[in-house]
Image: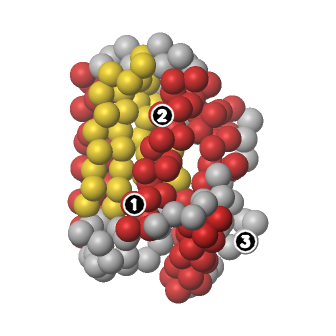
Amino acid sequence: MKDREVTLQEILNFRETKAMEQERLCHLYKDSVIIGLGMNIPGPIKHTPSVFHLFEDGMAKLEAIISQSGGVIKEKSIMNEHAGLAAVYSVTGTDAYVLKKESISLENSHPCGRLFDIDIFNRDGSSIKREQIGFPKRKCLLCNCDAKICGRSRAHSIQELTDHVWKMIESWEKQYDIK
């Protein structure tokens, strides 16, 4: 399940599965905030033991945020595939905007937080964007430009991006003695 290159079709299928799970929970738990946690891992290898450890750390920290905000997890669905890792939560008892603010704080404060992709969906199913609550758009992993613009323009090579990501993860593992 790890260290295997994935195809574009596998990545697209994984993304579709995650979106369908978010939609399923949104329809099933109409009174809930839906949270999606994924990993921003560029390149053809999306799942390694190191990425899995980081994903588990992200889940633990996200669940602590949910709990501290008074939220209750009604359902959690985990996707663990060659093409990636994701967790989708249905949460009641807290505010979507509070969760978005706290999830951005996690993305900004964790040594590898830039690799977390945390999406928060309001009770009506609409996604809450960073800009809606006064935060700037995500920055590129390598430069200070808008991440989407760099990605679309292919400003950096996949090799540059993957080298940077694996160094980030390796540094995190050493810092926290993870293995």
Judged by depth in the image, the label closer to the viewer, 3 or 1, is 1
Q: Position of residue 174 (x, y in %)?
A: 61, 70
**Separation of marks 2 and 1 at Cα, in angstroms:** 16 Å
Q: Which residue is mark 1?
A: 52
Asked if residue 153 can be seen in this view, the reply is no
Q: Which residue is mark 3?
A: 143
- For the image shown, how many numbered marks are present on the structure? 3
Q: Is residue 144 found left or right of 104 in the rendered image?
A: right
What's under tag 2, amino acid-wise?
Glu
Q: Nearer the viewer, residue 62 or 29?
A: 62
Q: Reading the chain from its start, which is encountered first: label 3 or label 1?
A: 1
What's under tag 1, amino acid-wise?
Phe
Question: In terms of secondary structure, where does tag 2 sit?
Answer: helix
**Separation of marks 3 and 1 at Cα, in angstroms:** 26 Å
Is residue 29 positioned above or below 136 on the image? above
What's under tag 3, amino acid-wise?
Cys
